Amino acid sequence: MLVDNLRETVFSEAGMSKKKRDISEKPRRLNKKFYEKELVRLQFELVKWQYWIKQQGMRVMITFDGRDAAGKGGTIKRIMAPLQPRDIRLVALGKPSDREQSQWYFQRYVSHLPAAGEIVLFDRSWYNRATVERVMGFCSDREYWNFLREAPMFERMLINDGIILLKYWLSVDDEEQERRFQERAANPMRRWKLSPIDLESRNRWVAYSKAKDLMIEHTDIPESRWRQINSNDKRRLRLNIINNILEAIPYENVIPGPMKLPDLPPRLFDYKRPPRDYQYIIKDHYANM
């Protein structure tokens, strides 16, 4: 009895010390003021980066995959915010149509590949087949194993043709994911982000873990490594991913210098504007502010 009690005490203390160690090792949330300042700096670097890609005629494709509520959308938003929209595109494909379901699986992704000087960001990529479709039973075993065999070949084809491919997997733990789900459920302005698939994923946490691990095992190839990152702190997530993107594709500052605008031509004041009475002028709701 004494031995059993001693063993129980040792195990309990070991568990407590481990718990304390885990808590102490968990990084605290990044300071908001530092985050906002660093984000501005990195976004300016992204502007330089895009100018370089445009000048060099590079073709860049970046995929963002991960669990539901892992922070993909917010990260993509911060990347795109300072950039020239003509040369960067977001691809977020919905459920495939009946026609697309009859095509080669990768076919509908091929039509979105970048041209020279373009950057394409995928909010979820072809890896939906190895995760969501696998876990939810939306694909057959044959389709699933065909995908795991073909995905590395497909990516090697892209890379051999000169496309720069970066693959990111965003990981979030179950407690943080549940907190975000609950926040979305309570907030009408964010409730649209909570789909039936998201709700079902809460019941299949382990299945998603198994699917992700098997996917990494088959598709983490030397030419196209999986870049995995913890997303429990969205501020750290965004800064770390932008830093990694900038490091992955070296660039030089080729932003054009300040422009000297020519003088304005003389104004012509003999033109009479038409009356505005019949035009639709938006009311200033804040005129008295």
Image: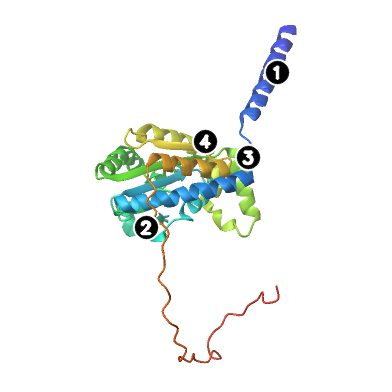
Mark 3 element type: loop
Report crowding for label 1: few under 14, some 14 to 19, many 20 or more residues within 10 A (C-alpha): few
Q: Position of residue 258 (x, y in %)?
A: 43, 59
> First in sequence: mark 2 or mark 1?
1
Amino acid at pointer 4: Val
**Residue placed under numbered mark 3 in the picture:** 29
- Please indicate whether residue 148 sits to the left or right of residue 204 in the image: left
Amino acid at pointer 1: Glu
Q: Quadrant of the N terminus?
A: top right
The answer to whether one can see residue 151 in this image is yes
**Residue placed under numbered mark 2 in the picture:** 87
Which disc number belongs to residue 13?
1
**Residue placed under numbered mark 4 in the picture:** 206
Residue at 38% x, 61% y is 86
Of 217 and 141, which appears nearest the observer?
A: 217
Mark 2 element type: helix
How far apart marks 2 and 3 lie (CA) works out to 33 Å
Residue 151 placement: quadrant:
top left
How far apart marks 2 and 1 lie (CA) works out to 57 Å
